[in-house]
Amino acid sequence: MGYYIYLGAQLPHLVYGQNLPMSSVAFKALAREHLSSSDAALLDHCTLDPAPDQDEEDGPSYAKPGPSTGSKLLNRWREWERVLRLNLARNRALKLKREGDPLEAPALPADAVGAAKNVMTIESPLEAELFLDKARWDAIDNYNGIDIFSENAIYAYLLKLLLMERRAAFRTEEGFTEYKALYTAILGEAK
């Protein structure tokens, strides 16, 4: 179903690194006015967490894929993010030389695996987060394809707004202070 006339044509183009043109909450409200009820219901599945529906006692589990959302784009996005997170956990465990067998992590999609590998070479926590968010942005673009006026384009737009909000929440000074405090605490525990 195309939403060209009702929604797609009025949206400002999003560019990675720009300021937010609107909040994700405002966009959801606007989108709900124009989408069918079934498509609007999927807006709640647009999240940066690949397993928001799983209710684990110790937090979300990414060991297995989550249930289908009914949207090809959202399913592919969630799998991409799940694979990224599993590979990040594996790479961090290997870098820290944790005992035991390394975590099994899927090898596909390759760009998620590559992002998890490449980010390990970045020293700055902020730069690492920005690198990962750019990889996420690119994955959303790849999964959205060229049909910019479909319901999937609306979901992709919301995911990008969520990434932009995440980036806007980074506070360099506060983050560096927190990083130094955590680093000092970790060194203190190691002694």
Image (spheres, rainbow, N blue to C red):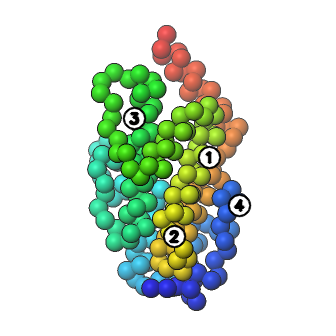
Give x and y (percent) for residue 92: 45, 31
Counting every numbered tag in the picture gives 4
Residue at the limit of the structure toward the top, as seen here: 191
Secondary structure type for disc 2: loop
- Mark 3 or mark 2, which has the lower sequence index? 3
Residue at x-position 41% and y-position 37%? 89
Of mark 1 and mark 4, the one earlier in the sequence is 4
| Mark closer to the observer (2, 1) | 2
Q: Which mark is residue 145?
A: 2
Looking at numbered disc 2 in the image, what kind of residue is underneath it? Gly
Q: Earlier in the sequence, mark 2 or mark 4?
A: 4
Residue 19 bears which disc, if any? 4
- Camera-near label (3 vs 4) is 3
Query: What residue did someone put label 3 on?
Result: 90
Circles 2, 1 touching at the beta carbon (< 8 Å)? no
Q: Secondary structure at mark 1?
A: helix
Give the mark nearest the N terminus, 2 or 1.
Answer: 1
Rendered image: mark on residue 59 = none
Three-letter code, disc 1: Leu
Residue 112 vs residue 9, the one in the foreground: 112
Q: Residue at x 39, y 69 (%)?
A: 72
User: How many residues crowd mark 3 within 10 Å: few (<14), some (14–19), many (20+)?
Assistant: many
Cβ atoms at labels 1 and 3 below 8 Å apart? no
Q: Which residue is mark 1?
A: 130
Q: Which residue is drawn at the image coordinates 54% and 39% (left, top)? A: 118
Judge depth for marks 2 and 4 and give the one in front: 2
Mark 1–mark 3 Cα distance, whole angstroms, equals: 20 Å
Indicate the position of residue 141 as horizontal and vertical percent values. Answer: 55, 64
Of the residues shown, which amino acid type is indicated by label 3? Answer: Arg
